[in-house]
Image (cartoon, rainbow, N blue to C red):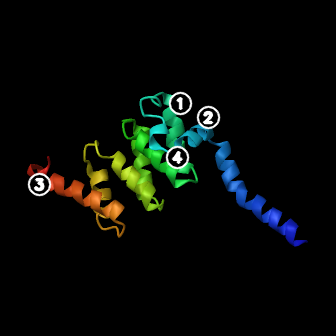
């Protein structure tokens, strides 16, 4: 087998998981992903413009499965205002994952308005010991604000 044929086979086989994952994406997810990759944040659609159930389903899928951290991060931040059980479950899964710190930091920011329950508190306590300051600092600040509510503005 020639080198070129082996290379083509390797590329095709490596793309299989991505291709099968993309096939499971909700309709319109890739179009939305392109919009989330806008160079300027002002060009990214707002949460208000993406408030339909179909848009939220696309955002949840992108936040969990897209290959680009930028898309995942922006999708998570747009989902911050969605109080659904599905979104909450997704955000907690991302916090527990091995996703890049940038993505997990976006998931952590998405929890800012959540009521602190045992599940979120356990994750905050774990993240407070992370080496990456993008995770450690906000987790520690949130825990400190809970322990000392008088220091919160």
Q: Is residue 20 left or right of residue 63?
A: right
Q: Nearer the viewer, residue 122 or 65?
A: 65
Residue at horizontal 47 percent and vertical 61 percent from the top: 100
Quarter of the view holding residue 2 = bottom right
Q: Is residue 151 left or right of residue 68?
A: left
- On the image, the x and y values in percent for residue 63 come to 50, 47
Query: Could you tell which of marks 4 and 3 lies nearer the N-terminus?
Result: 4
Residue 139 percent across, percent down from the top left: 28, 58
Q: According to the image, label 1 marks what residue?
A: 54
Q: Answer few, some or many: residues within 10 Å of disc 2's Cα (few below 14, many 20 plus, some between 14 and 19).
A: few
Residue at label 3?
148
Which residue matches tag 2? 28
Residue beneath label 4, please?
A: 39
Left-right relation of 58 to 85: right
Badge 4 crowding class, 10 Å Cα cut-off, few under 14, some 14 to 19, many 20 or more, is few
The crowding category of the residue bearing disc 1, from other C-alpha atoms within 10 Å (few below 14, some 14 to 19, many at least 20), is some
Quarter location, residue 13: bottom right
The Cα–Cα distance between marks 4 and 1, rounded to whole angstroms, is: 24 Å
Q: Earlier in the sequence, mark 3 or mark 2?
A: 2
* Cα–Cα span, label 1 and label 3: 40 Å
CB atoms of marks 1 and 2 within 8 Å: yes
- In this rendering, the label closer to the viewer, 1 or 2: 2
Q: Which of the marked residues, 2 or 4, is nearer the chain's N terminus?
A: 2
What x and y, as percent, mark residue 55? 51, 32
Q: Helix, strand or loop at disc 1?
A: helix
Is residue 50 in view?
yes
User: Which residue appears at 31% of the width and 63% of the height?
Assistant: 136
In terms of secondary structure, where does tag 3 sit?
Answer: loop
């Amino acid at each position: 087998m020639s080198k070129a044929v082996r290379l083509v086979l390797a590329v095709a086989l490596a793309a299989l998981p991505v291709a099968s994952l993309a096939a499971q994406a909700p309709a319109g997810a890739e179009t939305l992903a392109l919009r989330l990759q806008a160079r300027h944040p002002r060009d990214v659609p707002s949460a208000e413009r993406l408030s339909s159930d179909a848009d939220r389903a696309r955002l949840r899928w992108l936040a969990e499965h897209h290959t680009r951290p930028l898309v995942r991060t922006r999708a998570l931040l747009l989902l911050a205002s969605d109080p659904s059980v599905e979104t909450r479950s997704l955000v907690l899964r991302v916090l527990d994952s091995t996703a890049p710190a940038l993505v997990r930091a976006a998931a952590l920011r998405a929890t800012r308005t959540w009521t602190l329950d045992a599940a979120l508190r356990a994750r905050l306590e774990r993240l407070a010991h992370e080496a990456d300051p993008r995770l450690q600092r906000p987790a520690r600040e949130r825990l400190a604000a809970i322990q000392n509510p008088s220091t919160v503005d």
